[in-house]
Amino acid sequence: MADLRNEINKRRTFAIISHPDAGKTTLTEKFLLYGGAITLAGAVKGKKSAKHAVSDWMEIEKQRGISVTSSVMQFNYDGYCINILDTPGHQDFSEDTYRTLMAADSAVMVIDAAKGVEPQTRKLFKVCVMRDIPIFTFINKMDRDALSPYDLLDEIEKELGIGTYPMNWPIGSGKEFKGVYDREAGEIITFEATGGSREVAANKIDLEDESLADTLGEELYSTLRDDVELLDGAGYELDLDKVRHGKLSPVFFGSALTNFGVEPFLKHFLKMTSSPLPRKTSETEVDPFSNDFSAFVFKIQANMNKAHRDRIAFIRLCSGKFEKGMEVTHVQQGKKIKLAQPQQMMAQSREIIDEAYAGDIIGVFDPGIFSIGDTLCTGRRVQFEGIPTFAPEYFCRVQQKDTMKRKQFVKGVTQIAQEGAIQIFQEVASGMEEVIVGVVGTLQFDVFKYRMENEYNVEIRMENLPYSYIRWIDNEEIDLKKLNLTSDTKKVQDMKGRFLLLFSNQWSIDWALDHNKGLMLSDFSK
């Protein structure tokens, strides 16, 4: 039991979230570099570069130099076992991003110092608030021209409704970036560009050191003294309880590309976050230190290994210990199963494992029995709260071009939908000859088309539809034929047979609610 407790106490599981190009993938790679998981940080692919980020594994990601699926990486650092969930930051990301946050215990929010809070960050932040998880902020690219640190903090507080506590404070930015003031240590860490090598050249100088004015220059030195006085007098207090409930975000300034501030951030972050937390079930909470194993499926990915056409279910361990070959209960199916080929991930690299502990993310072979949100356990049967299905915002009608490939078409559409990257709907009382595909971001249409052609060998025809809103009908006993709806509202059903309505605008939603007494609509499905 002591070993179990020690192993779980070492675990830290967090997601990295950001708007496109804020430097999230670069920061992830620097973490892996410190943990010895990689020996060279590969820059995200440019037009002429053959390199691509280590966490981007899908061919379309390598071609475009962006992340479109969530990657899982594990490494050890400073006595901790760290599971990083690297989420897509692209503005046309997928629902996969939302679900990944369901598997994390905390989040690192990366913000571009020149751009501040951007639209994608707001979306992801909402999911963090829904989960009540701690959010740590890394304001990146201080070695480039940046907004005022006061404006950046003010924007985070106003836009996201969360308090901020700067753990360090930048001295200048861009060409004038001289380093940061570490508030806890009361010392200056000076910055010297080293081209992103593992250890940044950093000298520590006490704030009271007489040579500091010479090092920084009179103007920056004077500004720093005023800033420190203001921060100590007017800012929030560092309240770890507020941090752990997502009400206060510790903020760090640095530069992931040049490696400045990354290791101090990682060390602070690991100390301030907690080991895996209890998880809610439909009836109670599950203690991570319980001897009984429990986990849930939060992601399914087909064809990670194209040669084997395999399908991997990613599971988050919530309690106890996993051992290779153990028998578990698949709660939703009410069956005992063995989890085959348990493996840990480093993007596309995989390693078969013998054991894992609460907080870890592992992949298991899926013969087609798992769905997003399924619970696996030993001992007393538990069922974790379902993972919400979020409302897609873009829709298109999809048909196969070759009618002889109907079997492959149905298989491809169904499997990709089961992964959660797309949602599929059918018009009420129609078959699978054509389907309506809904996505959270339009890039998923390109990914879907690419995968249908390259993985399932099916060419498809796609027609954009003029709908922007979808609502699940919560009334179980309802006669669809009797609903009074606008002419541009479409009735559809999802893969589980639940009825939904597609709307072109908010006015049509209001009409449906006003003209159908007792009608209950929701914008996500549990």
Image (spheres, rainbow, N blue to C red):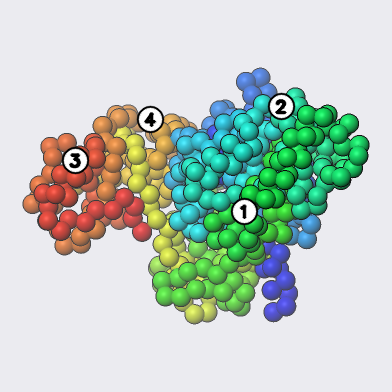
Above or below, 388 against 111 in this view is: below
- For the residues marked 3 and 4, what is the alpha-carbon distance in whole angstroms? 34 Å
Query: Residue 369 sits in which quadrant?
Result: bottom left
Report the residue at 72% width, 59% height from top: 271
Report the residue at 77% width, 40% height from top: 225
Above or below, 428 against 398 in this view is: below
Residue 430 falls left or right of residue 250:
left
Image spot of residue 525 (x, y percent): 33, 55
User: Which residue is denoted by mark 2 in the rendering?
Assistant: 174
User: Which residue is denoted by mark 1 in the rendering?
Assistant: 236
Tag 1 or tag 2, which sits nearer the N-term? Answer: 2
User: Which residue is denoted by mark 3 in the rendering?
Assistant: 508
Extreme residue in the top direction: 48
* Callout in the foreground (1, 4): 1
User: Which residue is denoted by mark 4 in the rendering?
Assistant: 459
* Callout in the foreground (2, 1): 1
Tag 3 secondary structure = helix
Residue 295 falls left or right of residue 226:
left
Report the residue at 17% width, 50% height from top: 513
Residue 127 falls left or right of residue 37:
left
